[in-house]
Image: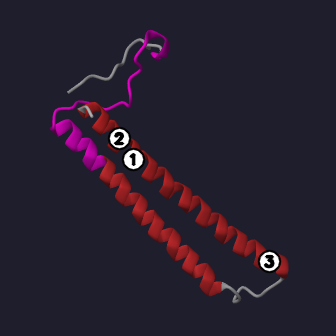
Amino acid sequence: MTKTQVIASVADDLTSAEQSVDAAIARATTLVQSMIGARLSLGVSPVAGADAQTRALEAIASLSAARQALVACHGELAKDHRRLGYGVYAGPMPKTDDEKPPVTEGRRLRAV
């Protein structure tokens, strides 16, 4: 594998991990909403299921901490990427003229 392929692979894995944690947070919050809605629909006391709901909210807090850690990891990898002299990573670059995105006037990324 080339250096570019290795870097792209790590970047793809990082993005995938970030998206997975975001999806888990969304699903866990949906669970809490479902639990509250079910309790209201059934006319059950707020005391019923309170411990389970607390555990679900603790899981959301833990997922949030995991997301913060991945964001910090992303930042550290970006610093290492620049420090090692690979410049700014903007994703895989198109290979043909047909695949190239339109160039906008003015600002462009530059390698550092």
x then y, percent, for residue 6 = 29, 38
- The residue where tag 2 is placed is 9
At x 42% / y 59%, what residue is drawn? 67
Mark 1 → mark 2, Cα distance in angstroms? 6 Å
Front disc: 2 or 3: 2
Q: Height in image: 83 above or below 58?
A: above
The amino acid pointed to by label 2 is: Ser
Which residue sits at x=44%, y=10%? 97
Check whether the beta carbons of the residues at disc 1 and disc 2 lie within 8 A of each other.
Answer: yes
Q: Which residue corresponds to mark 1?
A: 13
Quick one: SS at disc 2? helix
- Residue in the foreground of this view, choosing between 55 and 106: 55
Say whether disc 1 or disc 3 marks the residue closer to the N-terminus: 1
Residue at 48%, 58% (x, y): give it.
Answer: 21
Question: Up-down: is 20 above or below 81?
Answer: below
The mark found on residue 40 in the picture is 3
Disc 1 marks a residue whose amino acid type is Asp
User: Where residue 77 sits in the image (x, y, percent)?
Assistant: 26, 46
- Asked where in the image residue 26 lies, by quadrant, the reply is bottom right
